[in-house]
Amino acid sequence: MGKLQDKVAVVTGGNSGIGRAIAKRFVAEGAHVYIVGRREVDLAETVAEIGSSVTAIRADITKMEELDAVYARIVADGRKLDVVVANAGRAESGKLGEVDADLFDKIFNLNVRAAFFTVQKGLPLMTAQGSVIMVSSSLNNRSDSGMSVYNASKAAVRSLVKTFANELLSRGIRVNTLSPGPVDTPIVDTNSPTPEAAAAFREYAANEVPMKRMGRPDEVASGALFLASDESSFCTGMELRVDGGHAEL
Ligand code: NAP
């Protein structure tokens, strides 16, 4: 029997990188997983890769009506939710003098506002003893140049988790932060102007990590499985870093 046998989970950004690895692991452990993202092709590819017990919902979660439609679909399927993973995020950079309001809003709209409402709007569907996982970053308490907006957005996520965890104690719902370090996902390519720049970033990122390598999405999925399952039944409000020592050492 899997660690998430017969559980139902929603994973935003479940069609790529870390979210895709989480969805795959949850299904392998017996869950039915709803993956949410904007790109139809990646949604279809992920469903094909996982094979069964996975439902794709196309939605831009920064749009409240589309987020509502995600949960309406789960209700229409007659399901409750045991696990919510607020994972979708973006990571553009810019130094203090370069960031404009548009970039600032794009990052906070997705990483903070959409993550907040992903949890809020999922709550009515959640079972007692449910688990909420919010994906932050090892950068949430660091000072890497050019990352002020992203780092602040992920610090906000870390903060939300603490208050949500407190507010949801009475419902038995646990809320925890999952903070990956540099992980090799398509986000690196999305944020690099050329393949050469992406390769240079991968080398830089690996060197920044005390373990001298980038993480793999499946290593982060192992952390998500711990937080989603009864293995973490006495954990709430915590931060689990899966980062090769990036934030700790
Ligand atoms: P990724 O491969 O680029 O995945 C990002 C996901 O977010 C995609 O599935 C994307 O799907 C989804 N997404 C983006 N905007 C969305 C929107 N408006 N509505 C719905 N879905 C949206 O990146 P990743 O590396 O796996 O990152 C996943 C999370 O981990 C992010 O929160 C990121 O900040 C965090 N993180 C990553 C690293 C790392 O090094 N990779 C380190 C620390 C933390 P669509 O484009 O199809 O919408």
Image (cartoon, rainbow, N blue to C red):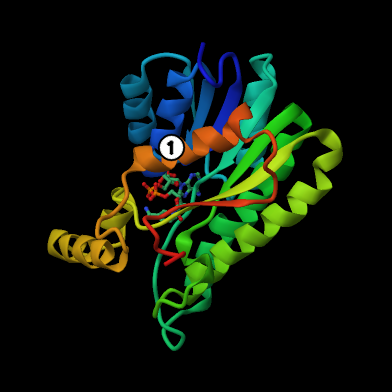
Left or right of 203 in this view: 148: right
Most extreme residue toward the right is 170
Residue 65 as seen in the image, left or right of residue 247: right
Specify the farthest residue to the top: 1
Residue lying furthest bottom: 97
Tell me the quadrant of the picture where the C terminus can be found.
bottom left
Instruction: Write the residue at 44% across / 57% down.
Output: 90
Q: Residue at x 48, y 79 (%)?
A: 100
- On the image, the x and y values in percent for residue 69 come to 64, 32
Residue 1, position in %: x, y?
51, 10
State yes or no: Cβ of the residue under disc 1 lies below 8 Å from any atom of ligand 1: no
Q: Is residue 63 above or below residue 152?
A: above
Q: Residue at x 16, y 60 (%)?
A: 199
Q: Considering the numbered disc 1 on the image, is that residue within a helix, a strand or a loop?
A: helix
Q: In the picture shown, does residue 62 fall above or below 235?
A: below
Residue that carries the numbered disc 1 in the rendered image: 221
Please, what is the three-letter code of the amino acid marked with disc 1? Answer: Ala
In the rendered structure, the answer to whether residue 52 lies left or right of residue 203 reads: right
Q: Is residue 58 visible?
A: no
Q: Residue 200 location in percent, x, y? A: 17, 66
Q: Is residue 201 left or right of residue 137?
A: left
Q: Does residue 174 appear anywhere in the picture?
A: yes
Q: Quadrant of residue 48?
A: top left
Quarter of image, res 85: top right
The answer to whether residue 7 is above or below residue 84 is: above
Give neighbour class at mark 1: few <14, some 14-19, many 20+ (Cα, 10 Å): many
Q: Nearer the viewer, residue 182 or 189?
A: 182
Front residue of 64/50: it is 50
In percent of width and height, residue 166 lies at 80, 50
